Amino acid sequence: MNREFIEQYIRQHCSADDYTCTIDESDSHETRFAQNGITQHLAGPKVRIELSVSFGAKRGKSLINQDDEESLAKLIKAVEENAHLAPEDPEHVPSVGPAELPEVQNCSDATQALTPEQMVNIVQKSIDKAKAMDATVSGMCEKHYSTNYMFTKNGFTAVDNRTTFGHSMTLKKGEVETKVSYEAKDFAAFNLDDEFARLASQAEALAHQKPFDAQKIAVILRPPALNELMWYMNWMMNRRQSDEGLTPFTGMLDKKCFGENFSLYSTIMNPEILIPRFNMLGLPSKETSWVERGVLKNMPADRYWAQKVGCEAQFPFNMYIPGEDSSEEQMMKMVPRGLIINRFWYIRPVDMKRGELTGMTRDGVLFFENGIVKHAVNNLRFNEIPHEMTQRILALGTSQLSSAYAVVPPILVQDFNFVDKTSF
Amino acid sequence: MKYLDLAMNAANSLGAEYADIRIQRTTDQRILMRNLSLKSADTQVVDGYGIRIFKDGAWGFAHNNVYSDEAVLATVKRAFDIAILSAKVNKDKKLCLAPERSYIATYRTPVKIDPFEVPLSEKVDLLMEVNRNMLAFDGIRQAMSYIIMHKDEKLFASTLGTRLDITYIYIDPIITATAVADGDSQSRTFDEGGRTVGWEWIQELNLADKAKQVAQESLIKVKADTLGAEQRRTLILDPNHLGLTMHESVGHPTELDRVLGWEADFAGVSFATPEKLKNFRYGSEIVNFVGDNTLSEGMATMGFDDDGVPGQKWYIIKDGILNEYGTTRDTAMEIGLNYSRGCNRATYYFDQPINRIPNLYLLPGTKPLSPAELIADTDEGVYIQGRGSFSIDQHRVNFQFGGDFFWEIKNGKLVRPLKKILYKSCNPEFWNSCDAICDERFWRPFGVVNCGKGQPSQTARMTHGSAPARFRNIRVGGSQ
């Protein structure tokens, strides 16, 4: 694909008062394995050319994935016609202008250089290790390279390149199922032996399971569990929705509605984490406090709403929750009994106004008492309000990379609200 | 198109045991109106081809959006090389493909009015009227209306000699009003799911009037009572609620790839394992589920699946007993079946097809029974309409569902509206508690447009359906 040609063509032929164009290219290789064999294996490039235009306050938007002259001509014609047919949008904002973007390093040479043969070797070794334990393993080994480019009539021009490597493994041995997942920009930091050792250790801990009834109980949420819960909470923190009375955060800005020891940021300071230079609205990524020591400091807002209510437009582009230094062993000694949660699954909102979510535990739950792990227990369903849960945090561990976009700690929480159990 | 033969000849020359090419152009138009602001009238066209090669018991799949002889041949080679790599790992675990014959066929979704030929201004005007009608009610804080129109144009060829030309169209309209009062906010949604029909359906629906009803009901809902503590109660569930319940608790557990553990790392597995076939009591004797990819207006009705297998109709649960799965050519042979039920579907050209839920519906009751009679026959309980919160474990056993609109039933009558109701149950308890299903006059479809599954993630479509049905002794209560 010739990005320069596309830009030049659109700049020359688009007659709209204003426009924003994004050109995304990517190439992926994805090897999916299950029960010790490969079930899917795919690769290929993708292209995405999206053009938004406006005539006054009338807007139109179209997307194609073909970059020849004829396709681009059709794209411009279609999107301009759509804009002419549209009513004036009372919430229209012009395209973004020149902006200062953070300088970040989102690409890894090691990830780019990774070959399909190497990826299949990783899968083969994962399977061999599972077989050696008389177990089966399922997962996904994936590599992605993408380039995102955006330009506007008002002078914004920016490019963002990224790589990601991921390798997840779910081990099944007898009735025990557990999972580890690695996702980062840099393949060089990946160590299969370490990952598999963690997986095997989790499986071993889960070997003896006893039935356990749903109840309010202390939990240690390991980073993948907290990560998942927090993305759903973020989703309910939208500024406009809150201002319109639809979320628990209505009227809560600058008030303490989270726990004193809880803060939440999007960061451009942590080199481990992926940092998009700009988002799909053309907003540059910048250090943002969403929650500062329990106080709600900012809420995600689009450009129209930000302008209307006088706040800064921004969305979470990654997640950083600062931790402290409690180890899991120390946390287990801080409460008489509790559960260690590896992951959550199928989280969904129950009550948007209260901020209540439901979901299940997955991939292993451990019961501890008097500071030591006693046995595994069945999976449990929770109905919980995450921002209120942060008010019950007793301790935090060290923050760690939980996915390419998240650095979060394990936390110890009192009285986590489990409401049901399942049979396994 | 010349690329079909070019690709298949190249695959044969390389030594593929089986290969297919799917050239697919997907066009979407999404119109989203929030209050009186048109948030989207986007058109999206995604065009390219995916090539699958099967060699030595393994798949390779490569995709491309460049149409040239060189690009097609390079993509065939890439898919072949990937298959060879996969086969090295699968040497002790080779996949097999169920036998299939060749077909030369054309399928077109029957539409009277092509939704893409309807002027954009007409669609926008309709949604503007819909939102105005909702916002005319005091207390409505947010009015949302949305229509998606979708078209797949596919050319498919395989080394079996199959040549297919498929045009598939669906429409899905949704209207939501959100009311704010007394420190609470509640939404009510009109959502019958998607259908493979033309714009004539939208004209029949009279969305402008539906908008008024939705707004009124959201105002009733925001001021409604809650139910209090959870206890065992009777439920009567409407078809546009049951659609999602059966999707999660019957549709996904009976996908054979999950049963085989192929989704173990992501979407999960299934409790409905093969030794349970023909003997496991999944539901009461009146519970009959049919897989049917020939269903008129069904979202998975497209003539053939992406294995080139024709649409079929079969019992998945018969008289309450687990009867059969939804299968693909590569999953069927794993449990000794020598045929596929045609459930292999991909979303875009760049997606490798995977085992998906077919159109799957609960057969209506065989004795005359209306919803009014069913309610009159119920002493106490809750009547639920529409979709709400939903969550199920990764074995598809334990679940919790909400809904969109709720009525308390007492002494055979709907006595008061309720809000924030949840019910909890599990397989097979839930379907075994079904003691009455209304008759075929009250059967309604519900088309799912966004069934997420797979890595990389794909969204599939399928239609569910039922008549209103009653479930006894279910844990029902308020949230938390």
Image (cartoon, helix red, strand yellow):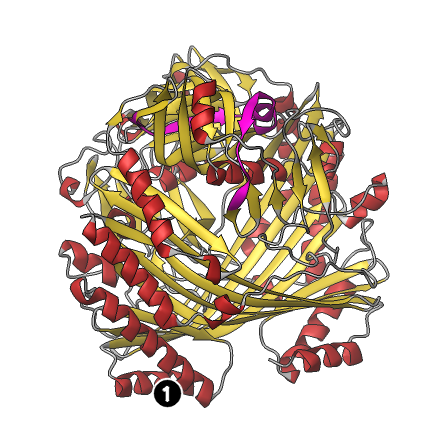
* Residue furthest top in the image: B411
Whether residue A411 is visible to the viewer of this picture, yes or no, is yes
Q: Residues within 10 Å of mark 1 (few under 14, many from 20)?
A: some
Residue nearest the viewer, comparing A340 with B457:
A340
Query: Where is residue B36 shown, x and y percent of the image?
Result: 76, 45
Q: Which of these two is toward me, B348 or A358? A: A358
Say which residue appears at 38% left-offset and 27% top-offset: A380
Q: Is residue B361 magenta?
A: no
Residue A208 appears left or right of B182: left
Which quadrant of the rendered structure holds the N terminus of chain B? bottom left
Closer-to-camera residue (A38/B12)? A38
Q: Is residue A311 above or below residue B154?
A: above
Task: Magenta stretch: give its range.
Answer: A375-401
Residue labelled with disc 1:
B6
Question: Image quarter for residue B70?
Answer: bottom left
Q: Is residue A395 left or right of residue B140?
A: left
- Residue B14: x and y, percent? 28, 85
Q: Is residue B381 above or below residue A21?
A: above
> On the image, which quarter does residue B244 sit in?
top left
Residue A390 image offset from top left, x and y in percent: 59, 26
Determine the secondary structure under disc 1: helix
The reply to whether the magenta stretch includes residue A400 is: yes
Q: Amino acid at mark 1?
A: Leu
In the displayed structure image, the side of residue A294 where residue A412 appears, left or right: left
Chain name for mark 1: B
**Residue B153, horizontal then vertical, whole percent:** 47, 70
Q: How many marks?
A: 1
